[in-house]
Image (cartoon, rainbow, N blue to C red):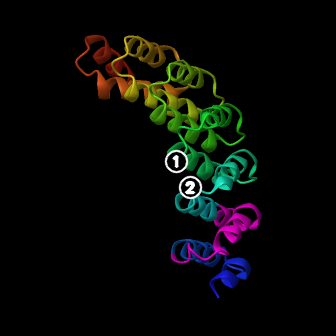
Amino acid sequence: MLRDRAHSDEISVVRRAAVRELARGWKDDPKTLPWLKDRARSDGRSTVRMAAVRELARGWKGDPETLSLLKDRARSDKSSIVRRAAAHELARGWKDDPETLRLLKDRARSDTDRDVRRTAVQELARGWKDDPETLFWLKDRARSDEDDNVRMAAVRELARGWKDDSETLPWLKDRARSVENFAVRMAAVEELARGWKDDSEVVAIVGAAT
């Protein structure tokens, strides 16, 4: 009955619930895994594909096809919410796979959806802080992404993850003074106020902004 509902119910919320319950309650059934893979690739609604992607990542991490399916969904699914979910699961579950970092950087630069790019920026900043290229790469996204929200995310992640780096404070001050976009400039001001409130120059910058 659950398989039938997950496959055929005309209401996507019902299909998604059936996917979730099958994955969690019948994990040892040999038909569950291939069925979930099919739903992750083929269901007509993005929310159902997203649910299948999440359940596969969390329940079948050891299956040799799970990683390749997630990479495919992160790159190729037509829905941004599925690509975001796949990118998130890759970052959390397959950090040690050398292709994960490359894929996230590619999504952060090239995905057509701003929310996918923002998610990739956040996952990279939080999961690869020790990678020597991450700081440089975040600065590039903070300057160059076409969308305000992605640039703001890069500014915030940089301020919070690299507070002790000697270049962070002057870089944020420069963003707060010189960036033309108001939202990005205010993100830099807010992070300065949050992390460097005792700096006299920061006090002046915040005062001028308010």
From the image, give the main secondary structure of the stretch colored magenta: helix
Q: Using the image, determine if residue 136 lies above or below residue 45.
A: above
Q: Viewed as shown, does residue 59 lie left or right of 161?
A: right
Among the 4 quarters of the image, the one containing residue 111: top right
Question: Can residue 92 be seen in the rendering of this structure?
Answer: yes
Between 141 and 86, which is closer to the camera in this rendering?
86
The amino acid pointed to by label 2 is Lys
Q: Name the secondary structure under disc 2.
A: loop
Numbered badge on residue 93: 1
Q: Which of marks 2 and 1 is in front?
A: 2
Numbered badge on residue 61: 2
Q: Measure the C-alpha gap from mark 2 to mark 1.
A: 8 Å
Q: Name the secondary structure under disc 1.
A: helix
- For marks 2 and 1 on the same chain, the one whose residue lies earlier in the sequence: 2
Q: How crowded is mark 1: few (under 14 residues within 10 Å), some or many (20 or more)?
A: some
Q: Do the residues labelled 2 and 1 touch (CB within 8 Å)?
A: yes
Residue 107 position within the rendered picture, expressed as x and y whole percent measured from the top left:
66, 37
Magenta-colored stretch includes residue 202: no
* Residue drawn 57% across the image and 63% down it: 55
Q: Using the image, determine if residue 148 lies above or below residue 178.
A: below
